[in-house]
Image (tube, coloured by chain):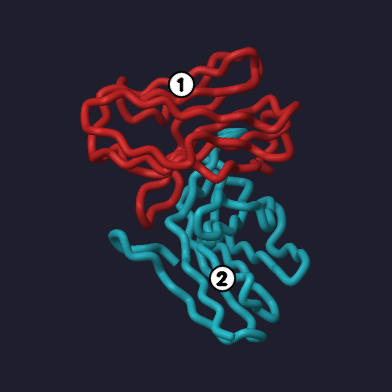
Chain colours: A red, B cyan
Amino acid sequence: GAGVSQSPSNKVTEKGKDVELRCDPISGHTALYWYRQSLGQGLEFLIYFQGNSAPDKSGLPSDRFSAERTGGSVSTLTIQRTQQEDSAVYLCASSLAVGDYGYTFGSGTRLTVV
Amino acid sequence: GESVGLHLPTLSVQEGDNSIINCAYSNSASDYFIWYKQESGKGPQFIIDIRSNMDKRQGQRVTVLLNKTVKHLSLQIAATQPGDSAVYFCAENSGGSNYKLTFGKGTLLTVNP
């Protein structure tokens, strides 16, 4: 597609439920990133995928968070047993290759845990 | 500049004036820096970048200045327009990483017509 597409754009969930957030990167972009943006804060790195290499999961805040990328394209970020502190905007970005910092970001998924 | 708590630093300017947004970065090993613009409800958008072997880089209406001695980065916007109103973030590659960025907390720029 023309840009990075994320869905849903908004998600309200009850504490303790699981959620899945989806990211469709730009076609041909081999690098994909997830960042989290809490209210009034900068972006916090979560996870990085590059081609078929093992992902860098060093930013995931707990084992309730996981992500996968199928076929080198679409990625899903899953949060299990959501907590109120998980409320944030989850941003996905893609770039042509490793070392290319010219990320293109999606518009994000605003997650609210009530 | 850096934010305190949940409150973003803010800069309010008149349309047509020049704007300067500042950022203190954290890692002396970082060698690549980017400025992003984020409008409400959208993801960050790349504005301009600079490598550590430079101290100045110019784009269209924007200039980035880098002072490695004091680990300071600034973004200058010439002839600021209402469409420039947004939150501006600086980001640095996380010293040694070739893909991971560390973002500052952002500055809210408001342009008054």
Residue A33 — which label?
Answer: none
Q: Position of residue B36 (x, y in %)?
A: 59, 55
> Which chain letter matches label 1?
A
Q: Amino acid at mark 2?
A: Ser
Q: Is residue B41 left or right of residue B35?
A: left
Along the viewing direction, whichever of B30 and B64 lies nearer the viewer: B64
Does residue A92 sit above or below A37 in this rendering?
Answer: above
Q: According to the image, label 2 marks what residue? A: B85
What residue do we see at 70% from left, 37% from top? A100
Q: How many marks?
A: 2
Along the viewing direction, whichever of B95 and A60 lies nearer the viewer: A60
Q: Amino acid at mark 1?
A: Ala
Name the element at disc 1. Answer: strand
What residue do we see at 23% from left, 40% from top? A114
> Which chain letter matches label 2?
B
Q: Position of residue B62 (x, y in %)?
A: 70, 68
What residue do we see at 55% from left, 49% from top? B43
Does residue A37 sit above or below A49 in this rendering?
Answer: below
Quadrant of the rendered image containing residue A101:
top right
Q: Is residue A44 left or right of residue B49?
A: left
Badge 1: how crowded within 10 Å, few (<14), some, or many (20+)? Answer: many
Q: Position of residue B41 (x, y in %)?
A: 50, 54
Name the element at disc 2. Answer: loop
Q: Position of residue B55 (x, y in %)?
A: 68, 62
Q: Is residue A55 left or right of residue B34?
A: left
Along the viewing direction, whichever of B112 and A42 lies nearer the viewer: B112
Quadrant of the rendered image containing residue A44:
top left
Q: According to the image, label 1 marks what residue? A: A67
